[in-house]
Image (spheres, grey):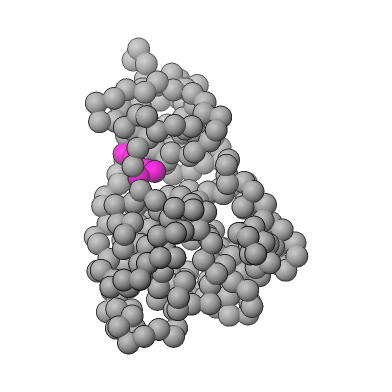
Amino acid sequence: MNKHEIIAKSDFVITLGTMLSNNKEEYRDSIIESIAKTNAKFVYMHPIDNIDIKLYYTQFIKYEVGSEEGICALLLDSFVKNSDEKIQSFINDLDLGYISAESSAGEEEFEEAYEESKECSFKTLIIGDDIIEHDRVENIIKLLAVIKKYSDLNVVVLNDELENKINSCETLDLEDIEELKSYNGTLLYRLIDDEQNDILSCSQTFANIAKVQDNDEIYINFAGEKIKRVLIVDDKLNGTVSVAKVSNCESELFKGYRYKQVKIEKVDA
């Protein structure tokens, strides 16, 4: 089966690191197909709620920007029940309370997801592109390789290169979960889209913090660069993470990890 067929056949789907929008909409459609065919339970995990799929998910686990390694550890604890002694020792030593607090994702949320999955027979974990440039991607790859090997989740990885790294991972010597880097203030999320536009979409909360208004021309300041865009307040968004559609990653702002801490400045302020 290809990736779409696996997703469409699933009766439990959990996603990590993708908004399932723009160039990933085909995977969203496969999830919707699984709901129609099997009445699938759908758990959506991301720092940004996607209102377009709100009708479809049965649970939303919102986590802090940058905490994907911790989220993988919480998945490991929840879904890996039969592993070797070394992996079980690693799981037993996890400080779940600390990881949960740092990632702002409750242990009970993962317990709820696991309980939902117990009634299901074909379960799938979808891994999105947010993981690729994470500072801790090498340990995340190991964590996902363990989940793939020792859980009953089908691991569907949307990026082929990342998928190959997980599939070929033979060294499962897991490292301690690193302390979460702080992402404060106004943040930008890079959303890959073939049709890049000159808009920065954000919530009213973001606009208030940045002291700008809907339809203002702004500069996004990052690492000495100034990128001009038009700020659009989108009532589908909330919180302090804005969204920029990008077709290429030539600017430093759009390289590396998908989230950046930025400063917003009104043009001609």
Q: Is residue 98 left or right of residue 266?
A: left
Q: Where in the figure is residue 69, as x and y percent of width and height?
A: 34, 61
For the image shown, how many numbered marks are present on the structure?
Answer: 0
Q: Quarter holding the C terminus?
A: top left
The one nearer the camera, 263 or 31, is: 31
Which of the 4 image quadrants contains residue 55? bottom right
Residue 72 appears in view:
no
Q: Where in the figure is residue 188, as x and y percent of width and height?
A: 39, 38
Q: Is residue 48 magenta?
A: no
Q: Is residue 258 magenta?
A: yes
Q: Eyeballing the image, is 245 above or below 75?
A: above
The one nearer the camera, 222 or 105, is: 222
Q: What residue is drawn where x is 53% and y is 72%? A: 153
Instruction: Give the dominant element type of the magenta stretch: helix, strand or loop.
Output: strand
**Farthest residue toward the right?**
37
Q: Where in the figure is residue 261, as x and y percent of width and height?
A: 31, 39
Q: Is residue 62 left or right of residue 21?
A: left
Which of the 4 image quadrants contains residue 260? top left
Span shown in magenta: 257-261
Q: Where in the figure is residue 97, as x and y percent of width and height?
A: 31, 72
Q: What residue is drawn where x is 30% and y is 46%? A: 183
